[in-house]
Image (spheres, helix red, strand yellow):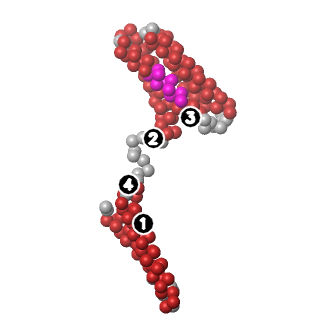
Amino acid sequence: MMISEHVASILVLLLTVSDAFSIGKVAHPANAAVDRRECLAGIVSSVFGAAVVTANPFVARADVSDGNSLPLGAAQFSRVLQLQSDLKGVKKRVAEGASEIDKKEWDNVSKFLRQAYSVGDDMKAIASGIYNPDNKKRALNDIVQLRKYAQAADLSVNKQDGSGFVGIAEKMEFLLSDFLDSLSDVPDEI
């Protein structure tokens, strides 16, 4: 246990006890018994409180965050942005070298498309916070379309059709961009 925790426990104890020994309460001898009871109750509660704090130091020193993960909403938004970034890289790789991609890499592209499909759940959670009904409808439509395109792109991947995949990936990029635009509530006039 750290020295500062001991000092804090002692200060709590002293503050509680000093209240019971105030000069006004012991001025009359008839109140002395009551004051002793109050003093004893204060000491017991202080000792109990200090014991609880020092017995479980993780409660007393709990970190707000471990620092290795984002809060749920931020993590969802981060996954959408990551998908947008990764989609550009995957599209570029397939566009530049579809003929040299082996079966294992096509399988990885297929896994990526499944991940893109599942990011739709994160997008739905984000879209639930959109207040403008037109933007919300647009965002939800983008999610549905993105999922359909992810499934269609998987068909191109299974056929190892690079040009078909690139065409669908461009549409997916547009949908992701449109989804992120629908989150903005700033009027166009500004």
Q: Give the range drawn in magenta.
A: 112-121
Q: Earlier in the sequence, mark 4 or mark 2?
A: 4
Magenta stretch: includes residue 84: no
Residue under circle 2?
Answer: 70
* In front: label 4 or label 2: 4
- Residue drawn where x is 31% and y is 61% of the image: 1
Left or right side of 138 for 153: left
Could you tell me residue 98's position as x and y percent? 40, 11
Q: Which of marks 2 and 1 is nearer the N terminus?
A: 1
Left or right side of 12 for 177: right
Numbered label attached to residue 181: none
Magenta part, dominant SS: helix
Residue under circle 1?
Answer: 49
The local crowd at label 3, few if under 14, some if 14 to 19, many if 20 or more residues have their Cα within 10 Å, is: some
Is there CB contact under 8 Å for labels 3 and 1? no
Give me the C-alpha separation between circle 3 and circle 1: 42 Å
Q: Can residue 114 be seen in this view?
A: yes
Dot 3 falls on a residue whose secondary structure is: helix
The local crowd at label 4, few if under 14, some if 14 to 19, many if 20 or more residues have their Cα within 10 Å, is: few
Residue under circle 4?
Answer: 58
